[in-house]
Amino acid sequence: MFSIEEIERIMDDTAEAVEKQREIDQLLSGQLTSEDEDQVLEELERLAAEEEEQETVPTLPEAPTDELPESEKERRIKGWLGKNSIFFTAALAQGQGQLPN
């Protein structure tokens, strides 16, 4: 069972929800007074300004432009290619297009 305090809290919450629903119904039905319309426009402008502030793109740091150092694996591959380039040249010259085993 609910205590009296819990029941009163539920009733207050329900009354607030009903009042909020009435406000929404008035907005949707177009029954705004000029004062209400001014308040709505002010709120819209405030929300738009907040959204613009949040959409500002932060300044990012510059990306490095230096070349990366060559890895040991890359050095070994280039060395191997340099030593074996004669095989590649010969295969291409003969039109085989295949690398020797």
Image (cartoon, helix red, strand yellow):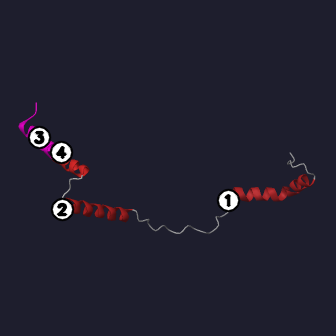
Mark 2 / mark 1, whichever is N-terminal: 2
* Helix, strand or loop under label 4: helix
Give the label, 2 or 4, closer to the camera: 2
**Residue 90 coordinates in the image, percent (x, y):** 91, 54
> How crowded is the residue under tag 3: few (<14 C-alpha within 10 Å), some, or many (20+)?
few
Residue 71: numbered disc: 1
At a point 20% along the width and 59% down the height, the residue shown is: 36
**Residue 58 coordinates in the image, percent (x, y):** 44, 66
Residue 11: numbered disc: 3
Quadrant where the C terminus is found in the figure: top right
Q: Is residue 85 left or right of residue 77?
A: right
* Helix, strand or loop under label 3: helix
Task: Measure the alpha-carbon separation of dots 2 and 4.
Answer: 22 Å
Q: Nearer the viewer, residue 2 or 29?
A: 29
Residue 16 magenta-drawn?
yes
Mark 3 / mark 4, whichever is N-terminal: 3
Give the label, 1 or 4, closer to the camera: 4
Mark 3 / mark 2, whichever is N-terminal: 3
Task: Measure the alpha-carbon separation of dots 3 and 2.
Answer: 30 Å
Q: Amino acid at mark 3?
A: Met
Mark 3 / mark 1, whichever is N-terminal: 3
Give the magenta part as a residue range.
1-18
Residue underneath mark 2: 35
**Residue 17 coordinates in the image, percent (x, y):** 18, 45
* Helix, strand or loop under label 2: helix
Residue underneath mark 4: 17
Q: Is residue 13 left or right of residue 40?
A: left
Figure check: 96 above or below 45: above
